[in-house]
Image (spheres, rainbow, N blue to C red):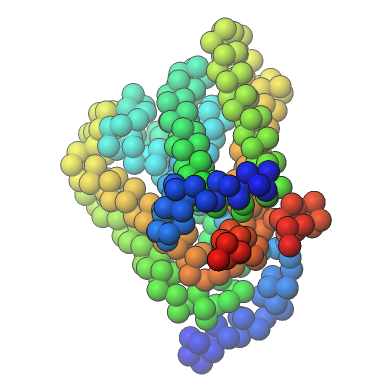
Amino acid sequence: MLDFARWLAQTRISLAIQTHAWVIPTVQSVHIAAIGLVMSSVFMVDLRLFGWAGTDETLRQTTRRFAPWLWGALVVLFTTGMLMILGEPVRELMSLSFWLKMLLIGVGASLAVAFQLTLGRHDGDWEAASAHHWRARCLGTVTLLVWCSIVILGRLIAYDHVWGSWSPAANLD
Amino acid sequence: MDIVDTLRWLEGSRLASWLRDSLYAFPLIESLHVIGLTMVFGMIAVLDLRLLGLASTRRPFLRLALETLKWTWGAFGLTVSTGVLMFSTSPIAYYQNVQFRFKMALLVLAGVNVLVFNRTAGRSVDRWDRDPAAPFAGRLAAAVSLLIWIGVIFLGRWVGFTKATDLTPDIDSLINLERF
């Protein structure tokens, strides 16, 4: 992995990003704005799931309303994420926080897909049950916690020392 | 007691010292700050995009505002308190940081923008509440709001780069130096 990261650091695109100091901060800012859209989209659907907001429409309608923003923002996050990896390959790829984050992103995205598919199939049952069923509330809470954890891990990439000797970065020198 | 004295006092406080010395406190607080600020931006975006007629257009604006604003304020509270805690670790350095000052100025502007909205489009909200988009003053306030908050995000990141708190060594630059 280290060899691959070092090789990446010498590619034309990586060097281009490295030599223009404004690129990484700008890409990070776009990344953060997109996180905002993901967080609020997930949160608004959760609010509907709990029956705390948007009860003038069905859960399916609420999900449909925010789905384009959620998935659009995830595409932006993926793109900006790739640019950040290309710009600082060793920093990202040799970080435990980064890999844990990727794992959780897989979980989060799977939850989102599963949720939307289930909603498509059992809309009637969900409407009756969703506001009170503990399973629905659990799912909503877990989803939000997963995305919050992703945000935390993203920030911890810069502080990978918190993992002590588990951090690959600690064993680099 | 002038402002620098107050900042110096804050810097020397027990809480600030503990935050500086702890390996985990600052990273965790900063992470909570990011969760807070992304929620603030995201929830404000929901309302702004509604005003602009770009999202949730079938839902009445007032109802959407009522549903979202209390959470927005909660997230803002989290963001401000984590921000204050981070500020206390190096108050003088942050105070003197140009990007930080601009960021604070933008936050004030965001508040002013809300006040202007309330006194213009906000006055007639009952009339356009169910329209897919707000009247011009409302759309302008929404666009300004989005620009301001994107600016806050950008400046916030810039503060991070000009007031170095990243404790991980810059590994990539070390690698590059080896090649010379």
Q: Position of residue B159 (x, y in %)?
A: 47, 66
Q: Nearer the viewer, residue A37 or B109?
A: A37
Task: State whether residue A152 is above or below residue B29.
Answer: above
Q: Position of residue B17 (x, y in %)?
A: 70, 77
Identified at 55% across, 77% down, the residue is B91
Q: Position of residue A142 (x, y in %)?
A: 68, 32
Q: Quadrant of the C terminus of chain B?
A: bottom right
Q: Nearer the viewer, residue A119 or B159?
A: B159
Identified at 54% across, 57% down, the residue is B79
Task: State whether residue A161 is above or below residue B121.
Answer: below
Position of residue A4 in the picture relative to residue B136 (left or right): right
Q: Is residue A129 visible?
A: yes
Q: Nearer the viewer, residue B35 or A126?
A: B35
Identified at 42% across, 52% down, the residue is A16
| Residue placed furthest toward the right | A165
Q: Nearer the viewer, residue A114 or A77?
A: A77
* Residue A131 figure quarter: top right
| Residue placed furthest toward the front | B180
Position of residue B49 in the picture relative to residue B8 (left or right): left
| Residue placed furthest toward the left | B136
Q: Position of residue A139 (x, y in %)?
A: 67, 26
Position of residue A116 in the picture relative to residue A103 (left or right): left
How many numbered circles are shown? 0
Task: State whether residue A37 is above or below residue A116.
Answer: below
Identified at 69% across, 70% down, the residue is B19
Q: Is residue A28 visible?
A: no
